[in-house]
Image (cartoon, rainbow, N blue to C red):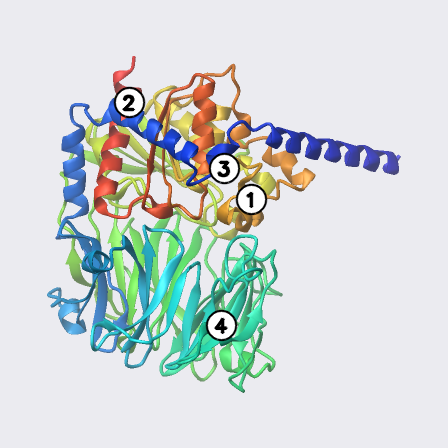
Amino acid sequence: MIRASLAALALSCSFAAVTAAAAEDKDPYLWLEEIEGKKALDWVKKENAATDKLIVGRPGFEADRKRARAILDDERQIAEPGEVMGETITNFWRDAANPRGLWRQSPLDAFLAGKPVWTTLIDVDALGKTEKQSWVWHGADCLAPDYTRCLVSLSPGGTDADIVREWDRATKSFVDGGFTLPQAKSSVTWENADTLLVATDYGAGSMTASGYPRIVKRWKRGTPLASAETVAEGEHEDVGMNVFALVDGDKRWPMISRGTTFYTTKYLIRGVSGESYHSTIIPESASLRDVLDGQAIVFLNEDFGTGFPAGSLISLSLEDMSADSQVAIIPVMTPTKAQAIENVSATDNVLWVKALDDVEGKLFALRRDPATGNWSQKEVPLAANATVQIAGTVGKRDIALATAETMLMPPTLYAVSENKAPQAVQSLPATFDAKEMSVEKRFATSKDGTQIPYFLARKKGATGPVPALIHAYGGFRAAQTPGYLTGQPYRAGPLGLFWVEDGNAYVLANIRGGGEYGPAWHQAALREKRQNSFDDLHAIAEDLVKTGVSAKGKIAISGRSNGGVLVGAAMTQRPDLYGAVISGSPIKDMRRYDKMLAGASWVAEYGDPDVPEDWAFLSKYSPYQSLRKSVTYPPIFLYLSTKDDRVHPGHARKYAARLKEFGNTVYYHEYIEGGHSVGADHAEDAVRAAMLHAFLLRELVEKK
């Protein structure tokens, strides 16, 4: 009986695999996966032009674009702290005059006093003009303690792949004959002033199936990269290798992380000899967050032994791990059931932890007793019912630089100490009049009874159903927290503000798959449980209808990247519920996603479509394969970038083509530059905000 059942299962799985393969062979739009193919780009130009014709000339479009650009380029915006280099702090700044940005520095004391004195280090616009390149800033890694030599990363057009060049902060120039890496998806860090650890594309066989480096080498100054010594290697099936360094006072700890899957990592530490790297006891499912007083601060995504639950922090001695000795496991912080540890950052003596408490931000200061090794914690009040982020730290002064904001309260940057009242460093003036608006946190009951939080913004005293826009993500442990409406939804500029000012409702959903309540919240929508995140979104939409906020057919849903899977599945499952869909840089084809650019790295999140048991659940919701000719779907606006080297443009292209083939309304806009974020500068971001606003007005407000 058991053998017969197993045989039937095997036959069923085999049939499913053959059916899936046959469906792939019959895909009439595979040609749209040719990113730079002439036929594909001609199709893109035609679709872009059709959308421009519908939207760009509309009354109100230009006013929206100009206002969005003014908000994004506002010179009063907070100068987010970069790296503190001794008594200097850096910042990367973009405005109307500097669309690609300035990397600059100010004396630390002037910055903390709210009166920074900026000196430009690199003008990205000027550099691009001189070098005839469309450079997009990807950051700089300057070597402590003098921070003179830096590794500057620049991307042509915004791709994930970038070039790395050595730069001198004293002379403000690139170093002649210095370290230089060609364009690739690289990971690089300083071992010392004359030696780098480099994971990059070394040629055939050196990259993983996900398109990331597989090999780490030690590259010494004055020698060719080709002669660099191999230090560590991963497998072709891995996600990739990364290198980084933890800095604890004057001690630098270079390390290597081997990502075996998206959620499992093997950490390697340099041994006491200083030459070789060996494994550590850090659990493969855990993440290394920082270092303080010689202790590696580790976040647990799964239970670890007895007494160390998932979602908590532990500390491990770096010296003991380097010596390959027995390592004591010390508990650092265990959150409550309503809390989730999100950000961790160390100063010289204090470990700063930002946690979510029912999706509202709290800041904690933790200290380690040098005598016992035990940790103590206390909450540091910052702002009630706000979104809090650790923006940076000032190590020697034990100061955390943290921001606090709500949907209606603009962000303020604070300098926070353990035993002093937070000092405001800079506040963004109100960009809009919020006195007639309200925000409330609500909970919807999902299909399995789980309570799902969401934030609702609308005008005070609103009565009767109004059009609503729900933004959600639901994956990869990424929590969605409510920020000032000028930046909501993510990568859509002030669309959320425009929408609420119109008298409509904006909703930020905290569905499962994210990290709002720690690892369990993410795991509840992993792989075969993905339907939970879709059900959560449906539940919030149904709750808006039930409570009279909105009505069926008047609810738009928005999602980017992984959120593209979400809104794609939602619109195919409940076309009756939704009236419009916004989908940015989206994943749509779950049959082929693992074969397209970085898609292989996401198998741990979604499942492997080449494994029949996995395709059995993936096929139930894959947006591209779920489209049916006999169904009318809500209008969709797809936006993306040709230069996206993370999520393949073919996902959106094929989805649009299939929808149009079946007679549905599609708005399509594919930017050439911008990469996965779809916006190399604020000009593109402003156009997108105006286009999306026009789309929602056309489909939810004006259409009867």
Left or right relative to 169: residue 195: right
- The amino acid type of the residue labelled 2 equals Val
Toward which corner of the image does residue 162 lie, by quadrant? Answer: bottom left
Instruction: Name which residue lies at 65% across and 41% down.
Output: 610
Asked whether 97 or 301 is in front, the reply is 97
User: Residue at label 2?
Assistant: 466
User: Residue at label 3?
Assistant: 533
Compute the Cα span from label 3 to label 2: 25 Å
Q: Secondary structure at mark 3?
A: helix
Toward which corner of the image does residue 500 lie, by quadrant? Answer: top left
Q: Secondary structure at mark 2?
A: loop
User: Residue at label 4?
Assistant: 226
Q: Earlier in the sequence, mark 3 or mark 2?
A: 2
- The amino acid type of the residue labelled 3 equals Ser
Q: Nearer the viewer, mark 4 or mark 1?
A: 4
| Residue 187 picture location, percent across and down | 44, 65
Left or right relative to 307: residue 389: left
- The amino acid type of the residue labelled 1 equals Lys
Residue 45 seen: yes
Instruction: Name which residue lies at 20% across and 48% down.
Output: 410
- Is the residue marked by circle 3 packed among few (<14), some (14-19), or many (20+) residues within 10 Å? many
Compute the Cα span from label 4 to label 1: 29 Å
User: Residue at label 1?
Assistant: 595
